[in-house]
Image: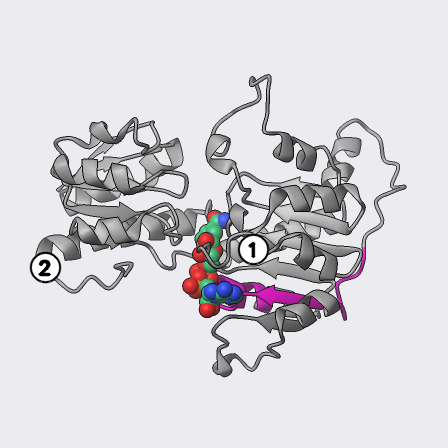
Amino acid sequence: MKIAFFDTKSYWRDSFGPMAKEYGYEITFFDERLTPATAKLAAGHDATCSFVNDEVPAEVIRELKDLGIKVLLLRCAGFDSVDLAVAKECGLPVLRVPAYSPESVAEQGAALLMAINRKCHLSYERTTKFNFDIAGLTGIALVGKTAGIIGTGKIGQCMINILKGFGMDIIAYDAFPNPNLGLEYVSLDELYARSDVISIHCPLMPETRHMIDKDAIAKMKDGVIFINVARGALVDSEALADAVEAGKFRGVGMDVCEKEHEYFFEDRSSWTEHDATLARLLASDKVLVSGHQAFLTVEALDSMAKTTLDNAKAFLAGEPLVNEVK
Ligand code: NAD
């Protein structure tokens, strides 16, 4: 199998390169993201391998089909980048990595929570300049506070376990509550009203786009900490920036943001003009943004490579495609 690998970075080459050789596959590593402008690079390959910020809309899928691509491999859990209806129409299976280390992703959520609450980013700025003044760095103790978890799937459950370790009380909302988890499920409105920390872990779909909007934010407690390691567009960033500037939040920790495909995984420090909303968010010391790195652990990368290549192997062998996105 020949795989056209898009949006390559050194960490991808290191995890996929040696393993692909063991499977007997040939990978061409392209630096480019998969977009309508770059889809033609896939000519001569059997599969594409794309990540969260690659763009796989209808026109790309049709072009890939014409180029002889037989299967679309996603090296991630989220599948919001792909037009699934058109992939189905073209007969191209979409195979993903449903779980590669949910613990790693939740741990990044916890890292952002701890850092923004205890103002580690401000502390770091000061101490590296030999400034050991701690005024203005007061946080809250999480023990006994209420955490509201939206989406109690694999990552949400890991986050719950971590937050229970801090002694937090957990309430949850899920469109499909899991009775086996022994959780206190509440309505979204009740979750907003009661939570001191809100962490969102549901997929981005048409019905969840901008679920955290102006109205939802207004229902949250003043001084809430909001964490998003799921998908940027779950949140209306304009409404978030307005609320941050109005002093609504104790802190916001984001590993994802709405326009991240223009920015993330690249050094954009030389750009002279930036997305206005992202710039507003970054200007606040109440907001801590990491560049979609929740997946970036040794264990997760290894697991992503193995599952992606196993998916390709199952496709080649005509075996059941257990990780197909339907
Ligand atoms: P999962 O499928 O195990 O869990 C998702 C949960 O969301 C399920 O319990 C589902 O019932 C629930 N859900 C679906 N629709 C909902 C709605 N409208 N409202 C509330 N809950 C709803 O997925 P997961 O592995 O826990 O991953 C969650 C998301 O995290 C992924 O979709 C992906 O976008 C994101 N993610 C981000 C990173 C990162 O590096 N930052 C890494 C992996 C995954």
Q: CA distance from mark 2 to mark 1?
A: 36 Å
Determine crowd level at label 1: few under 14, some 14-19, many 20+ residues with C-alpha closer than 10 A: some
User: Element at badge 1?
Assistant: helix
Which residue corresponds to mark 1? 107
Q: Is mark 1 within 8 Å of ligand 1?
A: no
Does residue 69 sit above or below 186 in this rendering?
A: above
Q: Residue at x 22, y 28 (%)?
A: 41
Residue 318 marker: 2
Residue 200 visible in the displayed image: yes
Report whether 325 appears left or right of 3. right
Q: Residue at x 58, y 70 (%)?
A: 173
Of badges 2 and 1, the one in the foreground is 2
Residue 309 visible in the displayed image: no
* Residue 65 pos. (x, y %): 16, 40
The magenta segment: 140-160
Determine crowd level at label 2: few under 14, some 14-19, many 20+ residues with C-alpha closer than 10 A: few
Amino acid type, callout 2: Gly
* Residue 63 pos. (x, y %): 20, 35
Amino acid type, callout 1: Glu
Foreground pick, 91 / 22:
91
* Residue 136 pos. (x, y %): 87, 42
Q: In the picture, residue 59 is in which quadrant?
A: top left
Is 232 magenta? The answer is: no
Report whether 141 appears left or right of 54. right
